[in-house]
Amino acid sequence: MYFTKKNSYEKRIELRNRLKKQKILKFPGAYNPLTAKLIFEIGFDGVYISGAVMANDLGIPDIGITTLKEVSYRANQIARISDLPSIVDADTGFGNCKETIETFENLGLAGCHIEDQIDQKRCGHLDNKEIIPLNKMVDKIKTAVNSKKDNNFLIIARTDANIVEGINKTIERVKAYEDAGADIIFPEAMKDEKEFEQIRKNTKINLLANMTEFGKSKILPANTLEKLGYDIVIYPVTTQRLAMKNVEDGLRDIFKNGHQNNIIDKMQTRKRLYELVDYEKYNTPDKKITDIKTDGHE
């Protein structure tokens, strides 16, 4: 009735099955639950929950400051609001991969990715990153795989080696992470079609591509990535960037003019907002507020 009709198990099964069809799945980033509802309504395949976006939303940089408690609380709010599977960014594992996997699985996520940077991480598309030794990342992946109770929960291994060590070392890590039991490989900051293709040729498991703006990667259409053999494409910060640009422009206009008459046409209307949150569904005399599920547990 409220939040989602499908439970977390059903969402994971559905995502697993869709990954077998060799048709790329599009996962826009949601910076809040309302955005996740919109992603669902428009017809996308899933929701991506970015660690960078969560840090930005708290007004801090994406350098490993956020905690598992902060990220899991928000991820649960976003994941439970629609019938789409949600994948969350688990940074470097928050210091305890076992606890991280158990937490996200219990809160209804469909999967998470863990990266091979040091804990004092940087955005995947910035220079001067530092990665951990291959064997340590392999141990993290094995711990993650062994920690999940639902085999359909996806363990995604992200490697940031390309900027640091180049494509050949990246491929070496991709192969090792596949052997360690990862379900999906996420090669970060591939520069062009050639590098995306090289990764595909060197692994048999599913691949995730990151089409973030203003980064190292050439922005490729989803159908191009599909032809290159990729299974999921994420747009992690797109919705937040769109929102913040409009918020900033609007606030500057109000500050300058003292009213919002110039920017009304840029706003979502009250009517549209109420449609999105299903206002009328709950605005009935026989609907008790206590009937609405709010704890998010399934």
Image (cartoon, rainbow, N blue to C red):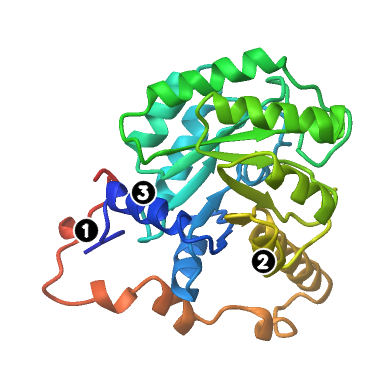
Quarter holding the N terminus is bottom left
* Crowd band around label 3 with a 10 angstrom C-alpha radius: few (<14), some (14–19), many (20+): many
Alpha-carbon span between mark 3 and mark 2: 22 Å
Residue 290 lies in quadrant? bottom left
In terms of depth relative to the viewer, which is nearer, 25 or 211?
Answer: 25
Residue labelled with disc 3:
12
Q: Position of residue 15 (x, y in %)?
A: 41, 54
Q: Residue at x 47, y 24 (%)?
A: 144
Give amino acid for label 2. Answer: Ala
Q: Residue at x 69, y 17 (%)?
A: 134
- SS type, badge 3: helix
Q: Residue at x 49, y 20 (%)?
A: 142
Quarter holding the C terminus is top left
Give amino acid for label 3. Answer: Arg
Q: Residue at x 50, y 56 (%)?
A: 47
Residue 63 lies in quadrant? top right
First-in-chain label (3 vs 2): 3
Give amino acid for label 1. Answer: Ile
- SS type, badge 1: loop
Q: Residue furthest left?
A: 286
Q: Position of residue 247 (x, y in %)?
A: 70, 65
Mark carried by residue 116: none
Mark carried by residue 222: 2
